[in-house]
Amino acid sequence: MPLRRFLSFRDFDWWLLLLVLMLCTVSVVEVHSATLHTRFSSFGTRQIFWVAAGVVGMFAFAKIDYHRVIDWAPWAYGAGLLALVAVLSPLGHKALGGRRWIRLGPVLVQPSEYVKLVLVLMVARYFANLGGRNVTWKEIFKAFALVGLPMLLVLKQPDLGTTLTYMPILVAGLFLGGLNLRQGLILLLCGAVLAGGVWSSGRFLKPYQKARLTSFVNPQNDPRGAGYQVLQSEIAVGSGGIWGKGSEKGTQTQGYFLPIPYTDFIFAALSEEHGFIGAIFVLLLYFLILMRLIQNAQTASDLPGSLIIMGIVAVLTFQIAVNVGMVIGLMPVTGIPLPLLSYGGSSVLFTFLALGVAMNVRMRRFVN
Amino acid sequence: MVPLGGNRGEKLSTFKLAVVQYGILFMMLGLAAGLWRLQVLDVDNYRQLAQENRIRKEPILAPRGKLFDRDNRLVVDNYPSVTCFLVREQSRHVDADLPLIAKGLDLDFEQLRATLYRYRHEPGYQPIPIKQDVTADEQAFIAAHRNELPELETIDEERRLYPRDGFASHLIGYVGEVSEEDLNNPRFAYYQPGDVVGKAGVEETYDELLRGQDGSREVVVDSHGREAGFLGIEHAIPGQDLRLTIDNDLQQAAELALGDREGAIVAMDPRNGEILAMVSHPSFDPNDFAVKINRTEWNRLVTDPEHPLMNKAIQAQLAPGSTFKILMAVAGLQEGIAQNMHIVCSGGWGPYGYYHHCDEKHGAVDIHNAIPYSCDTFFYMLGDKLGIDRIAKYAKEFGYGQKTGIDLPGEQPGLMPSQQWVIRNFHHRWYPDETLDVSIGQGAVEATPLQLARIIGGIASDGHLVRPHVVFPDQLPEDFRKSLLDSFPGSGDAYVPIDPDTWQTVTDGMADVTEPGLYHTAGSAHLEGIDFAGKTGTAQQMSHAALEKTNKGRSTNPNVWFVGVTPRRNPELVVVVLWQHGEFSYYAARIAAKVVTAYVDKKRREAGNLPPQKAAAPVEVGAIWSAPPVPDAKSAEAGQGQIQGGHFFVENGQMMAAKKAPAQASYQPANRLARLPGVHPSSRPDEISAAPPERRPRLKSQPRKDP
């Protein structure tokens, strides 16, 4: 392996960037279509700005040595926790039934999105320091505490969706960071028992929350209540057929039947207007992006680099699975956006910054 | 910084990465399969659903069932009203719009924000009711701001209209928006946030029947959700009307009789348990709840020391005082002890060191005058002979310490102490001295007014005890009636055999209570021509010293009771009056006497045999009136001649013949009228005497339904 002392953008993953930009193009077109006749019609244009800002941020992060980024991670973690506390304090901005934002000048920032990236780095750092050997129970519990603290703060906002996206970071870290089969099985069992306990005790989840979580199984039972969104989403997707109804022609999307078609349910809008072909095309793009990232993780020069990329893969995979699953009625409605496709500044920026760190890992694969 | 060097060069296991890759592949295939199912296999089905999705169902709210009294007179009605909803999903600037909304709809800004905050967990398409009873002006505001405030929507519905001034308010209850806690309660499983449910009284118990079933209109909407056509309607099924057992006339009489006093009245038919009147005072206006109750009014109601929201008739658990002596007498006679007791009351008794006082020095007392005298000494001795266990046995049999099972929410069971109770709760043995307090209805004994009505009514009915109810059960569906009995358990219908001698002795004693006589406790409540029997009671809650400490500035008077029945045996009516912090128990007896009089009068009026009243002196009434000018009027001032004056005798609601001229002089107003130009006093008196039709008491021939 030739040793080099400098970075070159020749090693930048242009293929990955191309795939990501293709996805962003789909996003802008679909956000534009979904908000066409509403007062949110500027969202398509705004999404372009967010993507542009994201690309700039990605290049900036790609220049920074990820080892230094990892060294900063504890500070960022502390700052992230402070921001999450600030959100809960009166400083936080309330909207749509939750305290999730902080106002920084003209823009609202959602700290929980950035904490996602910080957690990826922290978990990678933690397990890299353990050196890939088998972990002890004590170390496992420390990892749980590391991720559990921000999870509790975000759950308090309340934002169940984002809270859940922190889980795969931990799972990926544990799985790749040296958990053995026995420990894995025990944790799985504990998780199942705990989930069952929470579900049946009735103390933690209110009936309406349970209803929302279960209505995806049979939305027809409660078409006006919790099942409404799922049913409308399924109708939108299903009526799209193979070829779709055409851009800006989806009756469900344009007719306000589909709830929030520019963020959480954008995949339903896409599936309606561009059909099975369009949906599969987008899924294929996601698949290629994930595979490309995993390949980068494989070729990374050291364990922390691999773990960072795999953390990002875990978050993206989870969000795709839950969001698309929700849209087609396989998963409960949790309010998790589809990365790079849903409208939303914080979400887009997080994804690009995370990709920037991943790029740096790739660019440094021969640097030693 | 943590050294990372040691880990450099280490790699992730290829196997684990392969696992991840395959995991992602299978996930993608799963999602693709889901898409295939929806978009390829089921596409026709969903295409059709999408077509139908242009049809929107708008709810039509079902009017709640009305409530009628036993004579089918309307008690609770509905009126049409418009409610304004806010749908967050339809606007992005809801928070910014709030000040304008608050101003336009005349709402309190903070309260509006709080309302929205309560719904923060609900999805954005869920309509949030923000204002009920929207006025025409406010509707105009909403219509005018359709474009600026697309989040506002209105809906027509029927709202509750309750009798004014809290008439029977505790019995009827009220409705309100289902609360967040209620939604977690399995009983409210079928409700949506924003639904209106019964929250107290009959409204709560019979909510399932009263609420009806909402219908819907199907409308075609355009791509913006605006209505473009009308397809069909599924009418709402109105809630079932219910006939209450209360009698408006008697309820009114009872409310008037209690007046401003703090307390309660229960009037019940002890033959079947139908509640004829139920008053609890102070009361509240349920109409305040029908529209969203404002916070200050609510705070006033919940912090008032007199507990206006509490239905004292079924929830006030107080010492029954001397009314408990009826049960004591029954127990004593049944056990063969009281007949043989001939004692001398010297003003009290104290065999265990502590001297228990009697109100008077009654002298020679036996069971026949112990009840009218309410002689404590007699009952101390009787109680001592019986012992607490035998007293408790009889008390339990007749229903002390148990709910009656009335079909109203929140009934309290009262309390009947016993040896076991003391050991379990206070971990000491029962002191025989405590039995003496219990014997006169003090100590730990507690009962509700309704309980007393059932017990005393039952004793007067030869031991036939009934389950009180406020809605005629024959109008209820069978399964509802069954579940009602299960959800309101209580002592219910029961028969406790009593010796005929006991029955006669006790009821005669009660009749003597209201008979004027020396030491008779309620002689002043005597009703001429009505067989009215009863028992007074005076009960201190605690010592005067303790009262003054705790009840700052409030009355320290004891609670007074009266339990009355008419007639004395197999009564048709039992009335219980509780006056909290009243003065003397015979005041309570007079209140009960008013209720009994109203009942008996009504019965007699219906049967057409009111007792002949003493011919009251005719009342003289002066009047002026106008009449069309007489065609053959010769007077020059024919125009003014239309005004006429005179005076009449009015008797028993009937116009009698006008007084003849000689009396005129004594009637000042007529003389004054005489000075008016063109007015001739007592002109055409014959015409007047014929004019008013004879008024007869309205006969009620409504058959009574006694299930």
Image (cartoon, helix red, strand yellow):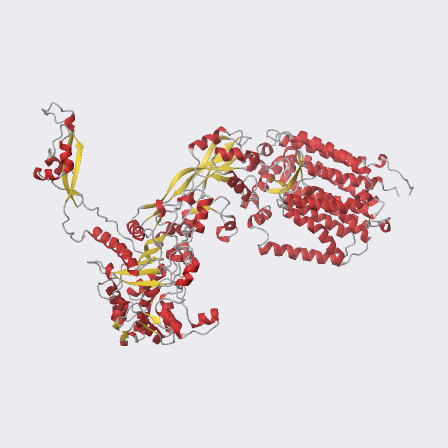
Residue placed most toward the observer, B589 or B333: B589
Q: Residue furthest top?
A: B636
Q: Quadrant of residue B658?
A: top left
Location of the C terminus of chain B by quadrant is bottom left
Residue placed most toward the observer, B525 or A70: B525
Spot occupied by residue A140 in the image (x, y as percentages of width and height): 74, 55
Left or right, residue B302 beside residue A233? left
Spot occupied by residue B312 in the image (x, y as percentages of width and height): 38, 56
Q: Quadrant of residue B289?
A: top left
Spot occupied by residue B271 in the image (x, y as percentages of width and height): 29, 60
Q: Quadrant of residue A227?
A: top right
Residue at 35% in and 74% down: B350
Residue placed most toward the observer, A66 or B488: A66
Please say if A82 is above or below B489: above
Look at the image and tell me whether residue A363 can be seen. yes
Q: Residue furthest right?
A: A2
Spot occupied by residue B100 in the image (x, y as percentages of width and height): 52, 33
Left or right, residue A114 beside residue B697? right
Residue at 47% in and 32% down: B230
Residue at 28% in and 62% down: B534
Residue placed most toward the observer, B317 or B202: B317
